[in-house]
Image (spheres, rainbow, N blue to C red):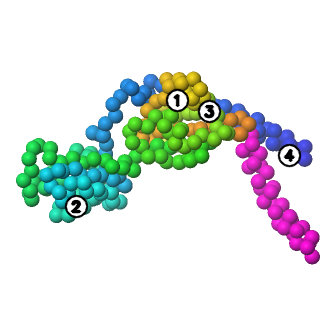
Amino acid sequence: MKNVLSMVVIMGTLAVLLTGCGPAKNDIEAFLKPYEVNTTVESYVLQPPDTITVVCSEIEQINGVTQTIRADGKVSFEDLGEMTAAGKTPAELASEITEKLRSLYALDGDYPLDVQISKPASKVYYVFGEVGRPGAMQFNGRVTVLNALALTDPQITAWRSEITIVRPDGKPEFNDKGKPVFKARKMLKINLNDMVAKGDTSENVLLQENDIVWVPPTPLAAIANVLAEFVRPIGLALQPMASYSQIQRYE
């Protein structure tokens, strides 16, 4: 029993040490503030399962038509047939639709048709850790870290002063063993307590597609998690014995 307790203490101590390890530096210069940039959809590349809406007041048949890009990357319109949408910007797709429509209708102006993004479902960021709703979240181009945390509900076990944003590098280098190494990743530590209690939004940065927000457990919560992982197998092993004892009691 003494050995077991010693192991639990060691594991708990390691949990505290590991939980307290944050990023080596804050790359805040790599993260933009909401007031420093005007995010637009001009460079947005459509992918499944984004949903688009066509706006063309001159042609009733297509005006307001909404399409979700299929898994094959295409959309289809009455009289126009199938068109490839994946890999194109909304402006590029609007230009192709306009070109096809001009063969059927008389259109005025250089830009008589617009393609709007109704639901940017293909772009996501991630929130993991001590939150009520972890996982992939829809990215709309104007998500701040405070938005992300408000949507995912940090739990009482969250270490709110040690939240970290990780911005992965999409082009890893490879070491001599062929393993990818993401040297260019950026990391920023966030203090949610200061944001909420003091109104300090200096770290309320804009997220980008594929950003990862990690909400670590507090040291005590980390110890509790380690203990739970240690005790759970013991509890499962004792269940058959407990069931047998109950059966014996009623015989």
Q: Which residue is mark 3?
A: 160
Amino acid beneath label 3: Arg
Q: Which residue is mark 1?
A: 188
Discs 1/2, front: 2
Mark 4 or mark 1: whose residue is earlier in sequence: 4
Q: Which residue is mark 2?
A: 77
Residue contact between numbered discs 2 and 3, judged by CB atoms under 8 Å: no
Badge 3: few (under 14), some or many (20 or more) residues near its Cα, within 10 Å? many
Q: CA distance from mark 2 to mark 4?
A: 68 Å
Badge 2: few (under 14), some or many (20 or more) residues near its Cα, within 10 Å? some
Principal SS element in the magenta part? Answer: helix
Q: Which residue is mark 4?
A: 4
Q: Pinpoint residue 220: horizontal percent, then vertical percent.
A: 74, 37
Residues 232 and 21: in front is 232
Q: Quadrant of the C terminus?
A: bottom right
Mark 1 or mark 3: whose residue is earlier in sequence: 3
Q: Is residue 157 left or right of residue 209?
A: right
Residues 180 and 147: in front is 147
Q: Secondary structure at mark 3?
A: loop
- Could you say which disc has been placed on residue 71 in the image? none
Which region of the structure is painted magenta? 223-251
Q: CA distance from mark 4 to mark 3?
A: 32 Å
Discs 4/1, front: 1
Amino acid beneath label 4: Val
Q: Pinpoint residue 158: horizontal percent, then vertical percent.
A: 64, 37
Mark 1 or mark 2: whose residue is earlier in sequence: 2
Discs 2/4, front: 2
